[in-house]
Image (cartoon, rainbow, N blue to C red):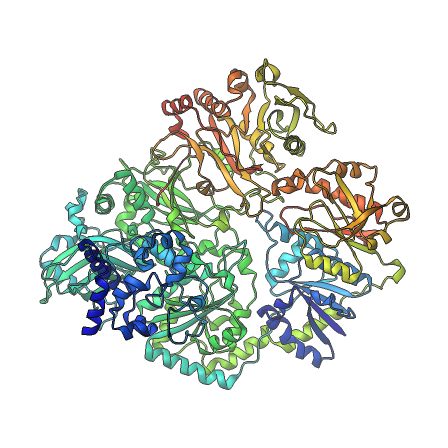
Amino acid sequence: MKIQILVRSADWLNSAGTRIRYLRLKRELNALGWKLAIDPISSINEGLRLNADIYLFSKCQDVGALMLTDMLREAGALVGFDLFDDYFSGQESATFVHRVFQRALIGRVDFLLCSTERMSAIARDSDPQVPIHVMNDPHDPVARTIVDSSIGARLLQAQESRTLEAVWFGHGNNPVFPVGLHDVVAFGAEFQVLRQAGWQVRLKVLTNSDAIDQAVLGALQTLPAQVQVEEWSEAGEAISLDRALLAFLPVNFQNFSIAKSLNRAVSALARGAQVFSPGFPLYEALGSFIYRSGPDLVDDLARGALKLNGGSLDALAARFAKIADPAQEAIKLIHFFDGLTQRPACSVEDRAMRGIIHGSSSPSSIHRLCKSLGWLSLGSPYSLYHQPFHAEIAQFEPAGSVELRVSREGYARLADQWRESAQPLARSVDGYSHIVPLPDSSAGRELATATPEMWKSRAARILTFSSLMRATQEVYREVFPQTYLLVSEHEMPLTVAEPERENGQ
Amino acid sequence: MLKRSLNTVASWFRFTRKGQIAELHRLKQLVSQTALFDEQWYLHRYPDVAKAGQDPIYHFILHGGAEGRNPGPHFDARWYLRRNVDVARSGANPLVHYLEHGRNEGRSIKPLQPGRNDDVDLGQGDMGKPSPPTEVADPYANDYDASWQAQALGWQQLGAQVTSSEPLTNIEPVLLAKLAKGSDQSRIKMFLATVPGARQTTIAKWQTPDPVLLGLELLVDGWFVHARQLLLRIDGEVSGAHRIVAFQSDSSGGTCRVADQVAASSANLVRLSLENPFSPVLLAWLASDGKVVRTALAMFPSLYRGGLHHAEMHAVSLQGQKSDAMACYNAELAAALFGTQPLLLGRIKVDLRGASGSEHIFDPAVVIALGMHFGTQLLADGEVTGSAMVADRLGVTSLDPALSARRRGGAALVIPADCLPSLASLCGAFDNNQVGAATFCIVPGRNIAEAVLACLPFTTDAMHELTHPALPLPQPRWEPGSRSQSPAQQVGLPSAIRTFDEIVWQVDALMPLSPDLELPVQTKQIRPPKLQVIVTHSGTQGQLDLCLLAISTQLGVAIDGVTVISTQSDITWPVEVEFPIAFRTPAGDTETEAISPAQDDVLVKLDTAVFPHDPRTFAALANLCRTNEIGAASCAIGISCSEEGVKEVMQAPWVLDCTFDPPGPADEAIARFFPAATFAVAAVDPRIMALRADLWREFKTADQVNQPADVATKLASLCRDRGLQTVFTTIVRAAAVSLDPFTEVSPASLDAFKAGRARDSATYLIRLLP
């Protein structure tokens, strides 16, 4: 059996999430006779063969992934999404676009993966019917000998220098929630207890470069520690964890933060760093290996006996085996997949034609995906940037009215009567060869009388998007018959109700 | 050395005038005092300077700065000049400019990205090899730092510190007792009396607020380097002093030595490692034989710059205009807190809506300090989001019994989780306190130079309910205790200090309320409000189309009719709407004659320069007007332009400022400090407003149709005459597609506001720091 994981981009292939969650499983799955491939979704444009039995989308949150899901299931594959972060709970938060996507998954997928029980419960609230599997982030093998010797050396160095080397690593910012470096600043006061006990703290912060700005750096400087900031890299994280005495991993109490996985603490412990985690007890499952308060850490430092030591490595390994063992996770995953019901594949003749209508904020990658997979790529009055669409409804001439123009490829896919009524353009402009009269329907009339004021400003788009985009969908459905259309739009809060799906949802 | 001197002197001869040589000396003095100029680094980096035997400082001042040479590894001169064109144009030496002006203005001295410093051209000639790009960047907080560092009178290195052989956690009762026997014993005894558990014995001198008691005239400045490290600048030398020590009480009820350093003649900075941010700090200058020479008692160190209550100090300074405001305020607060009178504040309730648990109020040191040093308890209140554990962080802490007893029956201060109670609230006596019930400081976490003093009075319970369901409470408020009294005045000393987080407060300038939510408007009315809408149009057909389309999408209201008033006769409107549209020209007709709304209707007046893009806008405004105490309501306006790069911002309607100047449009930068809630204002926004129909019938001034500013003024006056509020809400927004400014308020209107009672209930904002 083959599992194909499709991740958001090539960058995500190198991310900690991909490495920790999937690559560590790969060998174990292979040993059990399963193949695991991980590719960015853009590799479909480069000819990636879609011949897997099971597809898992990871950090892909756009209409391209949704349409692919429909297409792959139609072909008989099992398709699911890996849900990492809680952007969904609470109707009142600013994560509207995430909730819209979450709703789009309801009844559309064969399964969901989550990294924690809490995340699983949140997903269950959204869709009680979908099978959900909690796959813990597997840990790297613990190099016992190396870790054992370095633990003692790190403590000795700290005792001699009265300096604690600490590290924080991770994604430093979030557009919606105050997390990441915000937590470092907020909980950094915990270091004061260490200072009062005569310890100097040197904190290395490894994070994404776009999280580092003037305000954050200023705030970091207020910590009772000597702070050094570096851009995160896999190698840098490994080296830092190999050298640091402490991994500082505070967790705040927001829904988003408390649904996270254990992987940072697991990574730290596996490389011999003590974990100091004030705030929400996210790492409770790691029990006695976690420092929750400064005084506890001070006491152990005074005694010269830290929670992670040569004598507790066996217990750590046993704990990892229960919650993060790659072999066990692989077995459980296979068992879960084996329990899923597969739909029969549709015959090729019965498979739907597909098209995506681009709104004001639609990634160009969606357009390329359409071209690669033979879907119609359609422009709307809201499309900000012109792509070589198959068709576009827009105001093409200044002060002109809204028109429908098609390319040669689009012309070939028009319904017969619309192909007949299409007029060739005197010269091909922007790749369009024909102009098609708008239907004489309410949708057509609505588009014909639309003016640029309706989409130029964001406020106007908020006001008009729902009705005007619905009209656009209706017109396209009429001229491109039997085509299943979805709207690609990332600008909040522009949404339009999804048409009835192929499975009747 | 001689050669260097000669070469330097040669440079001096370019300074032909006596005054310029004096200036050169002054600049050398200035530059030599900063660690940003590294003499050895400079000579190593620019061997031509070393080769020429020139004094590096003089070289840098005379030539190097203009040539873009860096004075040290931490200052990028060329970048500074590129970034600050005005400095480059003026010809000023970049480091000198920074020391004298730039750091107070918050200017950066190097780019923030790691490694960029090495892109700088190192200078002329054989400069040696550029150092390799570094992967490491020290967190450089210069813009933050600049706001909190000392004023530009010199930057001196700290004096050599005595290396204490004892850890700072040692309790020093013996030393203090010894000190108390010497001179200045009264101040030391006063300090000892502030230690938790020792307050059964009160000091008579606390009863009168006398700043001299505290000795703070010695401490000319102070700032927090980090949350627990306070730097104090001493004014000059203390004769006979060999050593400076400082003490503070700790959480166990004892005292700790928090500073111990040599009182060197050139050192006037004392570095204190505080146990907690709030409790008093005693500084003692000791002679070589250990006797006390001088003392100073900083009662409330959090008032210093960078401290958790500094914004409060600034607000007090603005109001009092005293040169020794710090000392006076310390004395006033101390007299109240350590006196015998009942205290205003009984307890503190923390509304946990939107709390992440990482706010200051949850800091264990803060929780303990509030209990031990102020005798006040923190209680959780309101909805808990995320986890019930966040309430646990407020903890149960031991309370100072004497202070706690004086708080019994006091008022409760309800604060959002991102607030801290002010010292005025914590220390104020029950009687004669100056706390403003609706006044608080807002300190942006990302740019503390924009701190604001706000007064956002709630006037009705209904308005209090009109808050964002997930965001923090919009403001602190007071609830009477068993003594049935809260702060008497709305405007006064701040009740609380609030840390403003942009990510949390205003997440969308056009639509702060999630589209998944119905409007959280509390109303007991069953039927939707009936509206008459007047649209004033002087723009394009497209604007009118948008406006009418927006009206047609409004939810939760029944629109009886729309009247378009315009001088343009060729406008059109869609026929496919569910309400009748009438057209009127302004000449020869009054709005009141045109519209005769039924008794219980609401009238919405709208200019086509704005449109209610949020379908919940009319319902929000109409339901506000159906609230008993509200006469008129408007909403904030978001600017949404089609031009690239124009940010969406929010405009707030007219507010008064704390100096009671006439109303003007709230500065756009300040408008963002309005959290998502509903507030009383001096006047509604004439571009979009809802008003009770009965008020509209009294509104009979056709000549004001063309003066929208006066419309708002007269309406506000009318409301106040009838005991009604004019309010605005930021829960919903209307949109404007251009950046046209507000219409100016007429002089007659200004006079009306001055004479009126707007100040009793309106919203005030003033920016605190320049």
- Quarter of the image where the N terminus of chain B is located: bottom left
Q: Quadrant of residue A9?
A: bottom right
Q: Nearer the viewer, residue B622 or A388?
A: A388
Up-down: is B272 above or below A437?
A: below
Name the residue at 19% across, 70% down.
Answer: B5
Front position in the image: A439 or B670: A439
Q: Is residue B254 visible?
A: no
Depicted A332 relative to depicted A63: above or below: below
Q: Quadrant of residue B40?
A: bottom left
Residue at the image position 24 percent from the left and 53 percent from the top: B221
Give the side of residue A301 with respect to residue B679, left or right.
left
Q: Count all numbered tags in the image, as a single digit.
A: 0
Q: Quadrant of residue B657?
A: top left
Residue B155 drawn above or below residue A289: above
Residue at 66% from the left image edge and 46% from the top image edge: A494
Residue A310 lies left or right of residue A341; in this view the side is left
Quadrant assignment for the C terminus of chain B: top left
In front of the other: A59 or B723? A59
x then y, percent, for residue A174:
53, 57
Q: Position of residue A431 (x, y in %)?
A: 77, 53
In percent of width and height, residue A93 lies at 57, 49
Residue B411 appears at what percent x and percent y? 35, 40
> Residue B46, can we see it?
yes
For residue B78, side relative to residue A254 (left or right) = left
Indicate left or right for B250 with B472 as reference: left
Identify the residue shown where x is 61% and y is 60%: A119
Give the camera-side residue of A228 and B395: A228
